[in-house]
Amino acid sequence: QVQLVESGGGLVQAGGSLVLSCAVVGSFVSVADMAWYRQAPGKELEMVVSITGSSNINYAVSTKGRFTISRDNARNTMYLRMNDLKPWDTAVYYCNAEVILPMTFGPSDYWGQGRQVTVSS
């Protein structure tokens, strides 16, 4: 059984900072690509930033320069540092990971439970 356990987020004023973390726990061989997504009220799910197993990073245009993704492969944990937050960053943030399971071909896709980030103006 594999789970993605998210923590962090919360309420902050515009211009402030928050950190999200996502730990992959359970029985697995390794973690491949990981990503953060967000969904604002009434809007579609959008990719915020992704990071491959070899730490190649791809940011959404709206977050580049303000958000920083990192991962600790030894702890199977991904982080998202969000600086200079704007009211339109308000959303539920989800982590996503492709996990290599024992005795399987190809990665399996998992999602975290979501963390609310609210930015007040």
Image (tube, grey):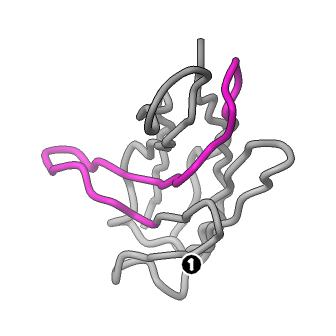
Rendered-image quadrant of the N terminus? top right
Residue farthest to the right, as pictured = 74
The answer to whether residue 45 is left or right of residue 112 is left
At 40% from the left and 64% from the top, the residue drawn is 48
Is 35 part of what is drawn in magenta? Answer: yes
**Circle count:** 1
Residue 103 x/y as whole percent: 56, 20
Residue at left 44%, top 38%?
A: 106
Tell me: 75 left or right of 37. Answer: right
Q: Which residues are magenta?
A: 24-49
Q: What is the x, y in percent for residue 10? A: 58, 44
- The residue under label 1 is 84
State whether residue 110 is above or below residue 19. Answer: above
Q: Residue 26 at what x, y percent from top left?
A: 70, 19
Identify the residue at the far top of this view. 1
* Quadrant of the rendering where the C terminus is positioned: bottom left
